[in-house]
Image: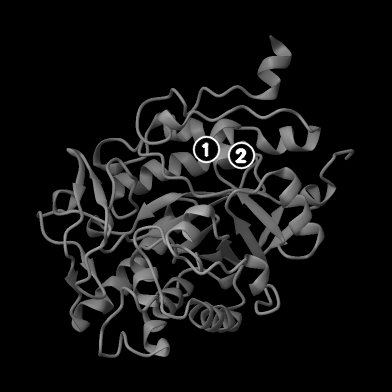
Amino acid sequence: MSTPHPYLFEPLQLGDIAMPNRVLMAPLTRNRAGTGNVPQAMNIRYYEQRASAGLIISEATQIAPEGIGYPNTPGIHSEAQIAGWQRVTDAVHAAGGRIFMQLWHVGRISHPSLQPKGELPVAPSAVRPAGKALTYDGPQDFVTPRALEAEEIPGIIEQYRQAAENARSAGFDGVEIHNANGYLLDQFLRDGTNQRHDDWGGSLEKRMRLPLAVLEAVLSVWPASRVGIRLSPSGTFNDMRDSDPETTFDSFVKKLNDYDLAYLHLLEPVEADIRHGGHAIPTRHFRPLYRGRLVVNADYDAASAETAIAAGDADAVAFGRAYIANPDLPERLAAGAALNTPDPQSFYGGDEHGYTDYPALADSAAA
């Protein structure tokens, strides 16, 4: 293939997944699930349009009713949700694609109005995040969450295990554990949010315990070659902090070497992280520490993605906003073609506008 970005278009084996290119679709919350948080017809079309990705990572999907943090986000805990996602995976596979599900519990980043019985969201500790929750009635102040009792934590682990099983039933090719962006597992890992003094907090080893227990539960369902995990070492989103993020994440990443996962998905530090006091740890810092496949994400374009892969700093790059506006992103990058401009007003919620109506190159050629 003659392309201005040859490294992006070298095939890559990601665990059991043979990818024709290294252009991944990042998990993108779009708030367009149907009644009961079930994937609907426009979700099927949206993912089908993007099947030429080396791998699609689905939008974050709540593992249980209590795991929800935003309106109209899909779940994987009911029969209707499993059936809805099966229609999505069938469409992606029929179009020649590959798709993992991202497993999600938001923890404290929720609101009683979103919870099944109007109860407080749960977290490792009763530490209220700054900011506002997005609810069906508009933005509302975050509340102080309820600290999980130690005897409740095995139930959370079981929810992840069952969700992994449900994702398999729905026809996914694998799963990614969402351990980033200030959600529940990230909250347990970092000492700014985990202020426990039991077996699930305190020392770094104890703070790592829940993320690793969840990983092992998921690995009881899926082979390691079909499991990825996402981390945000520099992230401040959702009011996150850690007293020593380099030690925390160095230790956790080294521990992940024990599992031979399909990939580790790392978020680069972005301007907002630095502005909010984050300690910038570039993803290339972790390359010598992690022996497996490394996927990177955040503000990459074709040139910077090509450079990262060529330098050996990453094996593949996940694209976010570019994939919102360009359903045929690999084809456009391979041809060096111009990209559609995304419309931020339609990112979250709405109908097909700004979701399934961005043109592909083939559309303009046919016009």
Say which amino acid is labelled 1. Answer: Tyr
Residue depicted at x 36% and y 61%: 163
Counting from the top left corner in percent of width and height, residue 97 is at 62, 43
Please give the residue where the numbered disc 2 appears in the rendered image: 51
**Label 2: which secondary element:** loop
Q: Is 270 situated above or below 248?
A: above
Is residue 51 shown left or right of residue 158?
A: right
In the depicted view, which residue is nearer to us: 296 or 157? 296
**Pointer 2 local density, CA inside 10 Å: few below 14, some 14–19, many at least 20:** many
Determine if residue 158 is in view: yes
Residue depicted at x 55% and y 55%: 173
Say which amino acid is labelled 2. Answer: Ala
**Pointer 1 local density, CA inside 10 Å: few below 14, some 14–19, many at least 20:** many
Q: Are marks 1 and 2 in contact (CB under 8 Å)?
A: yes
What label sits on residue 47 in the rendered view? 1
Determine if residue 161 is in view: no
Q: Is 111 situated above or below 94?
A: below
Residue depicted at x 37% and y 34%: 40
Q: Residue furthest top?
A: 367
Residue depicted at x 66% and y 80%: 289
Q: How is the image coloured?
A: one colour
Counting from the top left corner in percent of width and height, residue 283 is at 63, 66
Residue 341: image quadrant is: top right
Q: Is 190 situated above or below 86?
A: below
- The Cα atoms of the two marked residues, 1 and 2, are separated by 6 Å
Residue 188: image quadrant is: bottom left
Counting from the top left corner in percent of width and height, residue 357 is at 51, 22
What label sits on residue 190 in the rendered view? none
In the depicted view, which residue is nearer to us: 279 or 205? 279
Counting from the top left corner in percent of width and height, residue 199 is at 29, 90
